[in-house]
Image (cartoon, rainbow, N blue to C red):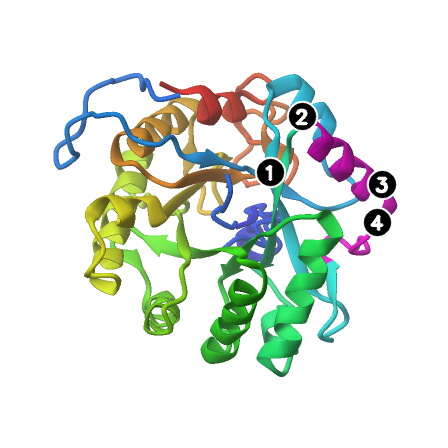
Amino acid sequence: MECRPSRARRERRTRHGRGGLSRAAAVLLLGGVATGCARSGDPAPEQRPRPRFAPYVEITPARPDLLEVADATGQREFTLAFVRSDDQRCSATWDGGLALRDPGLLREVGALVDRGGALTVASGGANGPYLENHCGTPEELAAAYRQALDAVGGNRLDLDIELDVPVERVNRALDLLRAERATAITYTLPVTRDGLEPRALSLLDDAARRGLDVSVNAMVMNVARDGSQVDAMLAAARATVEQLRRIWPDQPPERVHRRLGLTAMIGRNDDGTVTTVDDARELRAFADRQGVGHLAFWSVARDNGRCPGRVVAASDCSGVEQSPYEFTRAFARAG
């Protein structure tokens, strides 16, 4: 996910973070959009479960303080990104250079959980090194995931897969986690306006064959080559849903929609396009209408207006005019 500094360190999308992703998904994670009407092809409005919202926080020494964000916005659920391979080994560390059990981070996490917060751990991202490529067996990979989850006291795992990984090894490791501790698993994956790409589809096909219950978080970012940004994001979301229906053909439409997550990159995207606050509100309204399972964005550190008009995606500001945490409020409270 990151502000991909153009996939460079996203600077993460600037996702450095998304480093990301693939959030991702985001991955983790209210309805009234500026145009409250349903778009063509959407079902008629009805009461549906509200999506879980857990925006990404890139875990670096300069990260936003989770408690300060919670106090300012009321948001208490976050996706912590990213867990990576430490020095090309099967050992987990935070992408930003912090130890997995960094005392300062654990104090924040503990205080947030005491206030009713919840955390998802995200692995992978736009850059390596991936645990998935440096743990040699499913058992070793499952142990690394377990170590990361236990560090923050969580049981939600988000795999932001944007590079090649050994599909069978990864899904077998996830099988082990599901059997051992019923871990909630999300795959955060890049999409185009036409949906998921072949590499992502192969990963999900294998998961479905194994009976592995996963959510699929579509990274609806860097998708608008021309025309409306939000139209491109919604086109990518709809195309992804159709693909998920083919992967899980026996599941009812409502279940397929609940399996879907949507993660945007707020403000300036890596490809130069811009996601506005109004786009965020419309994406949230779409998620409410469709019964989408979860929402997220990249990233909380960017959710401020300190660099309006910046033409290159940055890791610490959105590049658009906005008030502090305006995107967080739009995603959390639209509709």
The residue lying furthest to the bottom in this view is: 136
- Please tell me how crowded label 3 is: few (under 14), some (14-19), or many (20+) other residues with Cα within 10 Å: few
The span shown in magenta is 94-115
> Looking at the image, which is closer to me, 154 or 58?
154
Mark 3–mark 1 distance (CA, rounded to whole Å)? 17 Å
Tell me if residue 15 can be seen: yes
Which residue is identified by label 4?
Answer: 102
Contact check, label 3 and label 2, Cβ < 8 Å? no
Which residue is identified by label 1?
Answer: 78
Which mark is first along the chain, 2 or 1?
2
Tell me if residue 65 can be seen: no
The residue lying furthest to the right in this view is: 103
> Looking at the image, which is closer to me, 252 or 40?
252
Look at label 2 and name its amino acid: Val
Which residue is identified by label 2?
Answer: 69
Is disc 1 placed on a helix, strand or loop? Answer: strand
The structure residue drawn at horizontal position 61% and vertical position 25%, both measured from the top left corner, is 304
Mark 4–mark 1 distance (CA, rounded to whole Å)? 17 Å
Which residue is identified by label 3?
Answer: 104
